[in-house]
Amino acid sequence: MKTTGSGSSVSLNSSTANHLGIINKNNDSNTSKLLFGILYSLKSISTKLIDEETSPISNALKSFTLGKYRIHYLESLTNLKFILITDIIIDNLQHVLWELYSNYYIKNCVENSLSPVEFKQSTDLKEHELMGKISNYNFIHETDHFLQSLSVFE
Amino acid sequence: MSSYYLTIIGTRDNPLYEVEFSSFKPNSSSTSSSASASSIPGRAQFAPDVREILPFIANSSLDIIDDSQWSTSNFNLGRVDSFYGLVVNAFITQGNVKFVLCYDNVGSGTNSKYDDNLIRQFFIDVNDLYVKCLLNPFYRVNDAIVSPEFDIKVKLLARKYF
Amino acid sequence: MSKSSKYNGDDIWKNNVEKINSELFTLTYGSVVAQLCRDFNNNYHEVNNQLDKMGYNIGLRLIEEFLAKTGVRRCQTFRETSEIISKIGFKIFLNIVPTIENWSSDNKTCSLILPEPNPLTEFVELPITTDSKISKELWYSQILCGVLRGALQMVQLDVDVNFVKDVLRGDDRTEIRLKLNKVLKDEIPAGED
């Protein structure tokens, strides 16, 4: 899973079943950046396909499928992106992503005054400074626990 | 028509607020000055020499107040002192701030029980106002109370009770 | 009708918001302001500044909670945004609903009129001093401006927020002016192009 404000991410590798996944491993890898680029492009296509002002239904990007994997995507109005990569048999995980945002992220990051919520990769931040990523233990732990408890997780 | 002098005294025996007023109710029994133009309702009619020493009278009762606060569990200490026809009633707040009311006992000596009860009510209401004042973040304990709103409200209470 | 009617501020307020004693809230905020005034030696411009900054940091967080609780979707016009701010935002966090008026012709500037009593200023009276500096310079509830600015910035709205009137100062009403500068683009972060 990857949450990104514009640079932060938590990656949980779902194949490592019984212990915590690897955190922030792929954050700076080129694959992540490519993934971001794809999502960004898909998103701009989706907004161009409809006239948002008249359409009652949002045309937001929710997921897309590759031969082997499905990429689940949720973006909050604050541009926080939640991305979950699963096997192709997993269908819709929007509610899971929403739960991650509205419950786990809010509870552990937003309401924790000492945990940063601005993930700007601003120039004043030095490289790899703590501020740019979620390193909050409770968030990582609970998120992991939550994902493992899902019926789709096997 | 009785005249009243109310003063609020802080925890360091410093005055925070004082006001003089008289009974607003027309009093038929006081014949001496009833017709004179000087008896504007609400204006205190202490004799000038008494008026000067009112703060001293109030202050001199502080020792008695300090002593008598331990003899009762009430905040209202009732009548604590008298001085040449002036009666002194007192009330002490939870925060050790004292309200002292001095008044001349003209024409109402017959029903002092009733008076004491009124004064008790009056003190309780003034205490409410004082607590409101304390809740103002810009007010610090033992600052003089200069808010015009407080002043007006105390005077309204005086009018209501006396 | 308007977008805010789809989301019910009353329901969220009743069922989905933790409530605290309003006196505790008012007094806490009051002590913060009074302490700032002392710390900055009655430099009220600086106090306003500090309150605004605190509010901004609150806004950055509050918006996430707001979005998660309400599920509000993106607004199409600034008018819609202002409705949401008033009828849902203020409602669920402060249980008041400011009125919105004074729209500029380009629909980018409006006023929020806070109803009395303002929950931040209950019990508060500005101290009486020989000069009227405090009542000319201090915007007691400035934190609200910061909150709005921070929260709106997180949803890509660059907005100027400031007080123009305050009942505490003796004005006839408490008025916050909102001015939309621009809608920020969803940009590709630097270094990821």
Image (cartoon, rainbow, N blue to C red):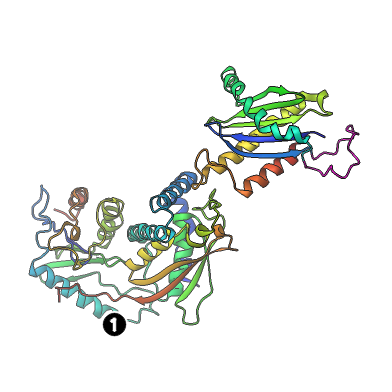
Q: Is residue C12 visible?
A: no
Q: Residue C115: percent from the left, percent from the top?
A: 55, 60
Viewed as shown, does residue C37 lie left or right of A58? right
- Along the line of sight, which residue is nearer the eye, A23 or C5? A23
Viewed as shown, does residue A94 lie left or right of B111? left
Q: Residue C17: percent from the left, percent from the top?
A: 42, 51
- Along the line of sight, which residue is nearer the eye, A133 or A141? A133
Viewed as shown, does residue B14 lie left or right of C88? right
**Mark 1, other Cα within 10 Å: few <14 / some 14–19 / many ≥20:** few
Q: Residue C155: percent from the left, percent from the top?
A: 33, 68
Point out the stretch of residues depicted in magenta. B24-43
Number of dots carrying numbers: 1
- Along the line of sight, which residue is nearer the eye, B19 or A34? B19
- Magenta segment main secondary structure: loop
Query: Circle 1 is placed at which residue position?
Result: A49
Residue sitting at the far front: B49
**Looking at the image, which residue is at 21% across and 48% down?**
A138
| Magenta stretch: includes residue B27 | yes
- In this rendering, the answer to whether B105 lies above or below A2 is above
| Magenta stretch: includes residue C163 | no
Q: Residue C111: percent from the left, percent from the top?
A: 50, 70
**Looking at the image, which residue is at 83% across and 23% down?**
B110
Quadrant of the image occupied by residue B133: top right
Q: Is residue A132 visible?
A: yes
**Looking at the image, which residue is at 18% across and 61% down?**
A132
Residue sitting at the far top: B71
Subunit of mark 1?
A
Residue type beneath disc 1: Leu
Q: Secondary structure at mark 1?
A: helix
Q: Specify the quadrant that holds the C terminus of chain C.
A: bottom left
